[in-house]
Structures are given as C-alpha cells and as structure tokens.
Image (spheres, rainbow, N blue to C red):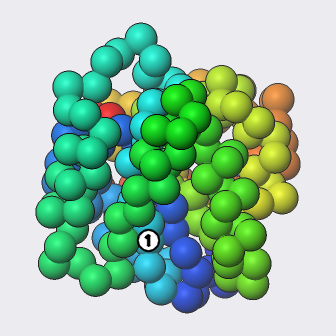
Amino acid sequence: MDNGSKNLKNGIGILGGTFDPIHSGHTEIALAVLNHYSLSRIYLVPVYKNPLRLHIQPVAEADDRFVMVHLATLGEPKVIVTGFEIERGRDIPEPSYTVHTLERYRARYQDLPLVLVVGADNVAFHKWHCAEDFPGLIDKIAIVSRPGFDKSLEESLEEVRSRQPALADLIEILAIVGNSASSA
C-alpha cells in the first residue's frame, strides 16, 4: 500500500462506471482526485455493461447514461466524458473490462501518469478481469473511501495484499468525499 505519491502532476485520471444515474458523489470524487493529484484532466467512462453488475439491468440505456454524465459535467472543463466503451459495447456486446480501458489510455498517453479511480465499494480486485495487468498500465489506484465501507474495504484490501501485492503497491486510500451515495 502506497503512502507516498509518485509525482502524478499533469497526469490523467480515469473513473469508469455504469453511472445509472450519475450523481453528485461521482462528480465530487472526480474533482477531488483531480485536485488531490494536480491532474491535467480526468475521464469519466460510462460502460456499456458493468462486469461486476451483470445481474443488475441498468435503468437507463447506455446512450442516455452518456448524455446524463455529459450534462452533469458541463461546467467542469477538466472532467471529460468519453463514450468509447459504449461504442465498443455496441460492436462487441460484452462487459466493459477496466483492463481494456487502461490499455487504451496507456497506448494513447504513453508518457503521462495514469490514475485509476475506484470507489471503496469496488475494491475486490480478485474479481476484476486481468487486474494483475494493472501495474504495467497505471501509476496509481486512488480508492475513495466513504462512510460505511470501512470493514468491507479493509477485507478487500487484505485480499489484494495477499493475492496481488504488486497491485496493492499502487493503492492509495483517499478519504476525501463524505458523500454516502452508492456508486453505479
């Protein structure tokens, strides 16, 4: 677990999710991480199908979720919404895996630090597709802690430490958002 931060200034943040719907907690997280690391921008990446929530049908269609995320971030020039996961999902209707998103950003921004932003409720990396590849793709995983997730967060972190120590080395816990709204 990283307590010191590699210089991430002017890097890129990546926050994926279903955003069904997007809420103030999502935008607060994006802005807090952007400011904490002095990133140049943060991308919000609405997914076509969330692999960790395949048993839950989104209420809003993918295009509607994209528009909602875009509208929610209009006043934030450093928060950029990208629809490439939704477009990819139309062509290949399978879950949107974070590793594919990270590969795309690493190829595009080879010389910039990349920060993956994850909510405290999604830290079970042993369930993520190819999470063992993350250390070669990103520089930091910013886990945003929220009230009510302390016990499950610590249990998930212990699992990461034991199964994926290289991944654990990238993690930094940020207790910067008090919003208790659930991510989606």
Q: Is residue 10 above or below residue 91?
A: below
Residue 99 in the image, given as x and y percentages of width and height? 69, 46
Q: Please, is residue 175 above or below residue 79 in the view?
A: above
> Callout 1: helix, strand or loop?
strand
Q: Residue at x 51, y 24 (%)?
A: 52
Above or below 168: residue 39: below
Name the residue type under label 1.
Ile
Q: Is residue 24 left or right of residue 145?
A: left
Tell me: 18 left or right of 75: right
Q: Residue at x 16, y 61 (%)?
A: 72
Q: Which residue is mark 1?
A: 42
Q: Where does residue 5 sit, x and y in percent of width and height?
A: 65, 73
Count neighbours of disc 1 (C-alpha within 10 A) and say few if under 14, some if 14 to 19, many if 20 or more.
many
Residue 148: x %, y % from top left: 32, 31
- Give x and y (percent) for residue 41: 44, 79
**Vertical side of 40 occupied by 72: above or below:** above
